[in-house]
Amino acid sequence: HPISLGFLTWFSLVPFLYSVYSFTTKNRVIWAGFLFGFTYSLTQIFWLAFNIGTSPTIAKITALSATFYLSIFYILFALLTFRVKNKSPWIGVWSMPFIWVAIEYLKSLGLLGFPWVSIGNSQSDYLLPIQIAEYTAVYGVSFWILLLNVGIIYWIQYRYKSTIIILITIFIFPFLIGQYLLRNIQ
């Protein structure tokens, strides 16, 4: 994104993830997934509406169609998380990063693949934490972002003091790995 606000993803998914985690009906979870998916996708692919080489009407239809299509994946994420959470709340909250990354991978496949809307791409302005992508690709960066947000949700939900230490460790880990990798470039 041209505005360089990638640091917001370190905590800005909390409202969406918390709503998916705390809603008790499937309809509310579906709406949360759709609303998040629609707004997130629209802010990520707004440039399709300014596509040069086609009429403005076709470009806007294309952008809106892609936004609706991408929203399906966030609905799927919300439903899978809801299902896991209903079986075990603890596993439900900590399964979110795994489900999110699996959905991102699924979203990148096929003719309609959209790998450039991965949440991990938001970190392209931060040299140290994205060094983990050397080993994990963009999905590792996405996993780290989700793990941070889920840790915040866990802390909000249970208020364990040890969660703060875990959150700090999760946050610092990619920076330390990135520092190590940049120092040992061969």
Image: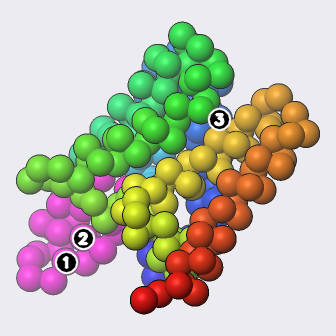
Measured Cα–Cα span from mark 2 to mark 3: 30 Å
Q: Amino acid at mark 2?
A: Leu
Q: Which residue is mark 3?
A: 18
Q: Which residue is mark 2?
A: 48
In this rendering, the count of numbered labels is 3
Q: Which residue is mark 1?
A: 51
Q: Position of residue 24 (x, y in %)?
A: 59, 15
Q: Amino acid at mark 3?
A: Tyr
On screen, residue 45 versus residue 163, left or right, reads left
Residue under the point 49% across and 67% down: 132
Within-10-Å neighbours for mark 3: few <14, some 14–19, many 20+: some
Residue under the point 53% across and 84% down: 184
Dot 2: element? helix
Residue under the point 57% across and 24% down: 92
Say if the magenta span includes residue 4: no
Indicate whether 146 appears above or below 58.
above
Q: Position of residue 142 (x, y in %)?
A: 47, 55
Q: Position of residue 65 (x, y in %)?
A: 21, 52
Dot 3: element? helix
Answer whether labels 2 and 3 touch (C-beta < 8 Å). no
Answer whether labels 2 and 1 touch (C-beta < 8 Å). yes
Indicate whether 29 appears above or below 73.
above
Q: Which residues are magenta?
A: 41-68
Q: Is residue 109 visible?
A: yes
